[in-house]
Image: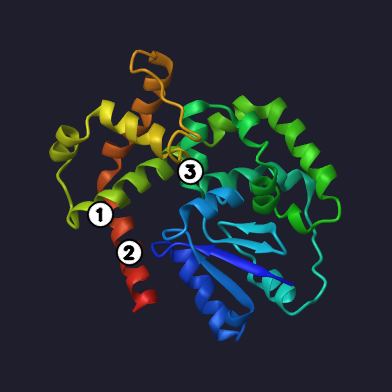
Amino acid sequence: MKIEVFTHRNCTECHILLDYLKEKGLIEKVEIIDTEKYPFLAFERGVISTPSVFVDGNLIFAGKVDFDKLDDILKGNKVESAILEDQLLEKLMEGIVDSFAATAWIYVNRDLSLFVEQKDFVMAVTGIAIDDRREQLYLRILKDVKEKEDMLLEEWKERMMRNIASNFVRELYWLYERKLDKEDIAKTYPLEVFSHWLMVRGGAVGRVGLRIYPLSDKTVISRISEAYLYLFNNYDSLWEKVVKEQRKLENLTS
């Protein structure tokens, strides 16, 4: 059995997972792949969020990892799944808003139906990757998303904007290593620059996955401007959240 774990050094969940594997004496059973050093390998394998865990080449966990189930897999035990069909859409959306790349792409393009064709990711975040009914359940997800797409996008809109704004603030933290005033952010990152950042960060590597909308596209820019406004309205609380998160990360890596 081959177990691969795709990680990133700035991913808190990745360090928690690695610490867990070390404590359980299981770290030697997995291959750790740093997505910061090997981004194109991660892209080739369809990694959208970290940590991502592959078992014999199949994506089993993405973003959030069920430690008990992973422990059973590593020990060679049979893993049982108890997925309830009425929970599938909630698990799907939780997995999406846990991934910045997925969130940014869906928020900008507003095309959830197209995104869920990323079959391996969808199966991993909903937990059906280890379910014997996975093909049947995946078809159920496709059907439900098609029927409820607009409702889901509206229902999860605030969570998506929070994800986007949090990641922007986190990158400011890494880049400047200090808190910028809102006036400085508005001056350095006006809506046009923020829009470009969001379009590019939404799952693009080079031209692959890149979808640029002109600033004259009022529908898209209006949607992005809502996330931009959310950023400023929640900047102080988001900054505090990022600082706490980064301090926790420093403790995990020290």
Q: Residues within 10 Å of mark 1 (few under 14, many from 20)?
A: some
List x then y, in percent, for residue 110.
53, 27
Question: At x 41% / y 21%, what residue is drawn?
Answer: 213
Determine the CA span between mark 3 and mark 2: 20 Å
| Quadrant assignment, res 4 | bottom right
Q: Amino acid at mark 3?
A: Ala
List x then y, in percent, for residue 226.
37, 28
List x then y, in percent, for residue 199.
40, 32
| 24 is higher (above) or lower (below) than 1 | below
* Residue under numbered circle 3: 101
List x then y, in percent, for residue 179.
18, 52
Question: At x 33% / y 56%, what residue is drawn?
Answer: 241
Label 2 close to label 1 by CB (< 8 Å)? yes
Q: Quadrant of the N terminus?
A: bottom right
Question: At x 74% / y 80%, what residue is drawn?
Answer: 75
Q: Is residue 195 visible?
A: yes
**Of the residues under marks 3 and 1, which one precedes in the sequence?**
3
**Of the residues under marks 2 and 1, which one precedes in the sequence?**
1
Q: How is the image coloured?
A: rainbow
* Residue under numbered circle 2: 246
Determine the CA span between mark 3 and mark 1: 19 Å
The disc placed on residue 173 is 1
**Of the residues under marks 3 and 2, which one precedes in the sequence?**
3
Q: Secondary structure at mark 2?
A: helix
Q: Is residue 237 visible?
A: no
Q: Amino acid at mark 2?
A: Gln
Determine the CA span between mark 2 and mark 1: 9 Å
Q: Residues within 10 Å of mark 3 (few under 14, many from 20)?
A: many
Q: Nearer the viewer, residue 9 or 210?
A: 210
